């Protein structure tokens, strides 16, 4: 998370795709490709009707608050519903892994 603070000037205000990972009564927790689960903070945004965990959205980081970021979902920028991981294949990977 210390690295996230070093990158802050490059991230504030920039739109980026993200994934909604949790819904709480007063916020949605999101991650972009820059936040590793269980290591980095999350991008916390106000709840929005019809947006649920697993939805991909367009985010903008507005400020840093501790290890987390405060942000917003850009108006009309719900990218897709549901998240599907890519199918993993190759040497040493069991058939059907990642499905």
Image: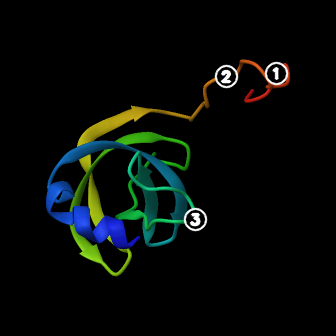
Above or below: residue 69 compared with residue 81 = below
Q: For residue 71, which quarter of the picture?
A: bottom left
Query: Few, some or many C-alpha atoms within 10 Å of disc 2 (few <14, some 14-19, many ≥20)?
Result: few
Q: For residue 8, which quarter of the picture?
A: bottom left
Q: Residue furthest right?
A: 94
Front residue (pair 97, 79): 97
Q: CA distance from mark 2 to mark 3?
A: 23 Å
Q: CA distance from mark 2 to mark 1?
A: 8 Å
Q: Quadrant of the N terminus?
A: bottom left
- Pointer 2 or 3: first along the chain: 3
- Pointer 3 or 1: first along the chain: 3
Q: Which residue is mark 2?
A: 87
Q: Residue at x 61, y 25 (%)?
A: 86
Tag 2, which secondary structure? loop
Q: CA distance from mark 3 to mark 1?
A: 26 Å
Front residue (pair 99, 39): 39
Tag 1, which secondary structure? loop
- Pointer 2 or 1: first along the chain: 2
Above or below: residue 80 compared with residue 63 = above
Give x and y (percent) for residue 28.
45, 61
Q: What colouring method underlies this structural image?
A: rainbow
Q: Which residue is mark 3?
A: 38
Q: Quadrant of the C terminus?
A: top right
Label of residue 96 in the image = 1
């Amino acid at each position: 998370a210390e690295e996230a603070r070093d990158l802050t000037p490059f991230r504030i205000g920039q739109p980026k795709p993200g994934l909604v990972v949790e819904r709480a009564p007063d916020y949605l927790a999101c991650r972009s490709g820059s936040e590793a689960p269980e290591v980095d903070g999350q991008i916390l945004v106000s709840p929005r009707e019809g947006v649920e965990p697993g939805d991909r959205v367009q985010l903008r980081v507005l400020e840093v608050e501790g290890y987390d970021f405060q942000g917003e979902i850009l108006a009309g920028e719900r990218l897709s519903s549901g998240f599907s991981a890519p199918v993993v294949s190759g040497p040493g990977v069991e058939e059907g892994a990642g499905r």
